[in-house]
Image: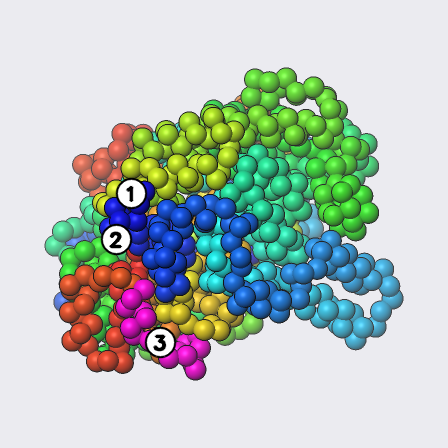
Amino acid sequence: MATSKLTQSQERHILERLSFGVTSSQLEQVKVQGIEAYIQSQLSPQLISESPILDNYLAQFSSIHQEPIELQKKDYLYRKKLRTSQLSTKEQKKIRQKIRNLNVQVRDEAMDAHLTRAIYSNRQLQEVMVDFWFNHFNVYANKGAVRIWLRDYESKIRTHALGNFRDLLGVTAKHPAMLIYLDNKKNTDPNSPGGKANQIGLNENYARELMELHTLGIDGGYSQDDVIALARILTGWGVDHQGKKGDKKGFFFNKNRHDQQDKLFLGHTISANGIQEGEKALDILASHSATAHFISSKLAQYFVADQPPTRLVNQLAEEFITSQGNIRQLMDVLIHSPEFNQPEYYQQKFKTPYQYLVSLVRMAGIEQPNLKRMRGMLTQLSMPIHLCLAPTGYDYTQSAWLNPQAMLQRTSLATAIANGALNRDYGIKQKQLQNNFGSLSPHTKQVIAKSPVKLRAALMMGSPEAMYR
Amino acid sequence: MKRRKLIQTAGLATAGMLLPVGYNSWVAQSANSKSDRQRLIVILLRGGVDGLNIVVPHQDREYYEARPTIAVPYPQEKNGAIDLDGFFGLNPKLKDLMPLWKQKQLAFIHSCGSPVAERSHFQAQDYWENGTPGVNKTRSGWMNRLLAELPEDRLTQALNVGVTTPYILRGKMAIASLKPGINSTAPIPTDRPHVNQAFSRLYSGTDVLSKAYQDGTKAREIILADLSQEMVSASRGAKNAKVFIDDATEVARLMVGNAKTQLAFMEIGGWDTHINQASTLNRLLPGLGQGLATLAKGLEPIFADTVIVVMSEFGRTVKENGNQGTDHGYGNAMWLLGGAIRGGKVYGEWPSLDQSVLYENRDLPVTTDFREILSQTLQKHLAISQDSLSRIFPSYKSSNKIDFFV
C-alpha cells in the first residue's frame, strides 16, 4: 500500500484503531514514513525505541522493578509474624499497616504503569494488544494476592501479545495471578495424599473458564465431563508463596495433590503423566478450531466492528490454524483485510471508558496528567483498571457502554479535563487538539464556533468524534 | 472468579437499576390505570447464589450428608436455620426478612430455573436476562420489552443507576441512569446551565448519542428533584455503608415520590462461592436482608402494589466441593416480596435431594421454569395481556400451576 493511495481518513482510521489516540508525533511519523511502514514497525514492537518520557515514569514506580516473588515473600513473612508471634496490639497495628502499604503501593503502581504505557508508549499497537489480552485473560486485582502479581502478569502478557497464542495461554495458566484468581491453586485430587491430608478436593472454576472464556468459547463443543476431566488434569497446579519450590518464582506443580489416573478429555485419552497432562491439554485447546474461531471473532470485534464480519472471522480463523496461533500474522492479515479498510466501519467503534479517557490525554497532549485522578475517573465510569470482577473481562461493544448516564459523565469529564482537572498548569492548545482530531462534522464545527471560547476544548473533547474510534 | 467484594465496594458501580419514569403522569400527577400504580423490582444475584443454604431443606435427610461442613444447622441448633414451615428454614443471616415472612409478604419458590441447563455464569445470566433460554441471539432484555408493552398513553422513560447497561435492560426503549451508591446527587459540570446549553446544542439531533444525552439530562432533573430534598439514608456516610442498602433507599424514594418510577432493576454480585462458602455468605447475606427490609419499609405506602423478585442464574451443587464451597449447579430458589403476594409459604414442587432425582447426579433439578414466575407476575400484577406477554417471553406458555397472588 502506497501512502498516496490512502486517503487521509483511512490513515486516521488505522492510527485510531492501532493506538490509544492520535498524537501530533504519530501524524508526523506517518507523513515521513508512510502508513505501511508505520503498520509494519508497530507489528515489530521490539525494534521501536521506547519513549524517554515513559522510561522516566516507569523509573519512578519502584515496586514494578522488584521480583514479584520477593514482594510476595515480604507479604508472607509479615502475615506469618502476625499469626505466630506474641505481639502487642500496637506492634500488630504497625505490621498490618505495613502489609496494607505494601499491597496498595504494588497495586497502584501496577495500574499507573499500565496507564502511562497506554499514554506514552511508542509501541502503541503492543499496548493495545496488552489491553485486549489482559481483558481476555482477565484477573481481578483485589482478590487475595493477585495484586502482588499484577505487574508481572501484565508484563508476561506483553511479551507474547504479538507472539504465539499457545505461549500466551501457557504463561497465563501457570501464573500465580491466574492460579489465585480462578482458584486453581486449590484444585486437588481428593484421593491424593495432599487431598486427604488437607481434606481438600476438586475445584472446576479455572477448568471451565479456560475452555469457555480463554479458548474454545461457550459453543466450543465441550461437556460437563470435559470440565471435570480438565479440572482433574490441572490438579496440583498451584502457587508457592515462599518461592522455595517449583520454578522458585511462584509456580509450583505439587504432584502430591495431582490426580494420577488417566483422563478422557475432548475425545483424547490423556495418560497419567504429571504436569505434562496439563501441557497436552493446553496444546489441544490452543490448536482447536473452535479456539481459532473464538479468538478471531473477538479480535474482529475489538478492531473492526461490534458485529464482526463473518468473512473476516473465517479468514482469521484459517490463518490462526495455518500459522499455529501466530498473533502477529493474524494482526497483519486483519489490518490489511478489506473489512478493516472499509470506510463504512470508520469511526464506528464506541470507545470504552478507558479508550476514551486515554485518547483525550493523548490527543490534547496533556503533560504529566494526574494518574490517581485518572484512575478515579475510570472507577466512576465503571471501568477501573485491573478491577473487572468477572472473568469475562470488560465488553468492547457500544451497547455495553452507551447510555444516558454515560453521556452525562463523559461530557462532564470532558469539561473538567478541559478546565485542568488532570493538570491545572497545562493549558490545552486548541489548535493541537483540532489537528489531532482531524476533520469534525459540520454540525460539531458549527456548534463549537458559536460557543464561548472557554467551552470549545470541552465541546471538542465531549463531541461524538471524540467518543468513537 | 469472585464478585464477592462488589456489594461493599462503592466505587465499582455494582448495583444497576432501571427506573422508568412517566413524565406525563409526573407532570399531571395522574395514576389511574392499574398498571400505572403497580411497581415491580427485579433483583439479580449474579454468580449463582446457593439457594440450598438460603432456603434450607432441613428435613431432607440427604441435605446434611451432602454438606458435612457447610450445611446450615437444624433450627434448634446454634446458628441454625430459622424454621419456615417445618421442612424448610431460612438462613439465619437473613433474619431481617422474618417480619415480612410473618406478615405473609414474603414467599419462595424452590427448584426454579431455566429449562436449558447451563453451568456457564454468563450464558445462564444471559438466558435469565434475555428471557429466551436456549436462544443466544436475542438482542433485547425482557425488562426492556416489558417497558415497551406498558400503556402507550404515558411517555415512559427508563432510568438506570450505573454506567453499564445490563442485558436485561438492553433494547429499543431508552434508559436513563443514576449514579449508584452514595453521592448520586453530587453536582456535575453539566448541571451548570451554560455547559448544559452548549452540550445540548451539540447533542440536539436524533442520533443515538444525542438521544442518550437528552434522556440523561431530562431524567437527572426529575431524579434530583426527588432525591435532593433531604438525606435519604441512615447509612449514608457511615464507614461500612452498604451500597445496596443506600440504593434500596433511593429506589424506594423514587417509586413512592414524584418520579413515579414503576420498574426497577438492581444487581448484586459476589455469590460465586467456590471456596469457604460460609464466610462469604455470612458476610453478604445480612446486607442483602437489610437492603430488602429497607426497600420494603421505604415502599410502605405502596407496598400493597409492589412485587419484588429476587433471582440468580443457577443454584449450586448439592454436595459441597473439596474447598468448603460449592460449584455451579442448576435448580435454585426464587424469592417474592410484596403486599400482593400470598406469602408465608414455600411454593414449588420439591424434588428431594435423593441422588436418583438429581440433575446429572449432582444438582437440584428444575421443577418450575423461571418464566412461569415472571409471566404470572407480569400478568396478574402488571395486568400485561397475553398478547404482550408473548412478545416479552416469546414461545413460552404459562402453565399457571402455582398461584402465589392474593
Q: Image quadrant of residue A58?
A: bottom right
Amino acid type assigned to the residue bearing label 3 in the image? Ile
The structure residue drawn at horizontal position 45% and vertical position 49%, both measured from the top left corner, is: A42
Is residue A460 visible to us here? yes
Q: Which residue is mark 1?
A: A341
Report, in whole angstroms, how far the alpha carbon at label 3 lies from the one at label 2: 24 Å
Report, in whole angstroms, how far the alpha carbon at label 2 lies from the one at label 1: 10 Å
Q: Reading the chain from its start, which is encountered first: label 2 or label 1? A: 2
Amino acid type assigned to the residue bearing label 1 in the image? Asn
Chain letter for mark 2, please. A
Q: Which residue is mark 2?
A: A9
Image position, residue A232 (x, y; %):
67, 29
Query: What's drawn in magenta, residue-wise?
Result: A420-436
- Identify which residue, B79 or A381, lies in the foreground: A381
Chain letter for mark 3, please. A
Is residue B130 visible to us here? no
The structure residue drawn at horizontal position 44% and vertical position 36%, both measured from the top left corner, is: A330
Q: How many numbered discs?
A: 3
Vertical arrangement, residue A391 with respect to residue A359, above or below: above
Report, in whole angstroms, how far the alpha carbon at label 3 lies from the one at label 1: 32 Å
Q: Image quadrant of residue A412?
A: bottom left
The structure residue drawn at horizontal position 78% and vertical position 32%, both measured from the top left corner, is: A255
Vertical arrangement, residue A338 with respect to residue A63, above or below: above
3 vs 2, front mark: 2
Vertical arrangement, residue B13 with respect to residue A14, above or below: below
Q: Which mark is residue B25?
A: none
Chain letter for mark 1, please. A
Q: Reading the chain from its start, which is encountered first: label 3 or label 1? A: 1
Please state if A312 lies on the left or on the right of B346 as rendered: left
Q: Reading the chain from its start, which is encountered first: label 3 or label 2? A: 2
Q: Which mark is residue A428?
A: 3
Image position, residue A338 (x, y; %):
29, 37
